[in-house]
Amino acid sequence: RQNRAEVIVEQLDNLTTVPAMTRQLGDIRVSRIPLEDLPESLPDHRLDRAGIADIYAKVYELSKDAPLLLRDPLYAYMNALDQLGKGNKRAFRKAMQLARADFKQATRRQTAIETMLDQFQETYAPAEDRFDIYFDTVGRADRDLRALDPKLHEVLDQASR
């Protein structure tokens, strides 16, 4: 039930960033702010422990669907969220930055593996295709031998049953 790396990255990004309205060059835009940058962007925010527990549970469910290389970095995200749930904002920020760096590196490795496997799958030829010439040659040789002495091969076929 594993998902590909890009699916995990997208889902994790949706879980660990928050949409917020920002003003850029006079325009008001909606952009996503990482959770660890939220205290700087919204200094008067309050800690929502239920929301943190919900994100924690969703990251845990995401880790079940993640390839093996991405699981430890996802557990690091869960550890960071646990720190935030306890109110340790500094420890959360540091743990989240480390988790993001580890996840980015693991994603690069996983993507390279997935690309390599996709290339192998594209070039894979089933055994019957690879040995088609050999099977064709053996079949023609058998037909030629049977054509030389059909009565002998009839007797041999009956004896082999």
Image (cartoon, rainbow, N blue to C red):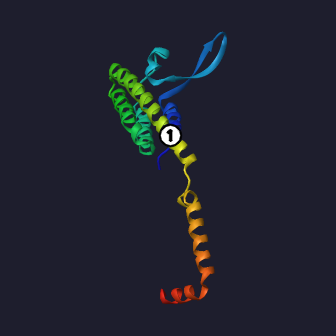
Percent across and percent down for residue 140 are 61, 70
Q: Is mark 1 on a helix, strand or loop?
A: helix
Q: Which of 126 and 69 is in front in this view?
A: 126
Q: Residues within 10 Å of mark 1 (few under 14, many from 20)?
A: few
In this view, the residue farthest toward the top is 25
Q: Nearer the viewer, residue 45 or 126?
A: 126
Camera-side residue: 13 or 45? 13
Q: What residue type is labelled 1?
A: Met
Please identify the quarter of the rendering in which residue 25 is found: top right
Q: Is residue 152 above or below residue 45?
A: below
Determine the residue located farthest toward the right in the rendered image: 27
Tell me the residue at 38%/21% (across/down).
93
Residue 21 image position (x, y, % from top left): 59, 20
Name the residue beneath numbered marker 1.
116
**Tally of numbered discs:** 1
142 shown above or below 24: below
Give the left or right position of residue 79, taking residue 3 as reference: left
Vertical order, 85 against 139 (above or below) = above
Q: Is residue 43 above or below residue 5?
A: above
Give x and y (percent) for residue 6.
Answer: 53, 36
In the displayed structure, does residue 153 sit left or right of residue 55?
right
Instruction: Give residue 74's position: percent from left, percent from top.
Output: 40, 35
- Return the residue nearer the eye: 61 or 106: 106
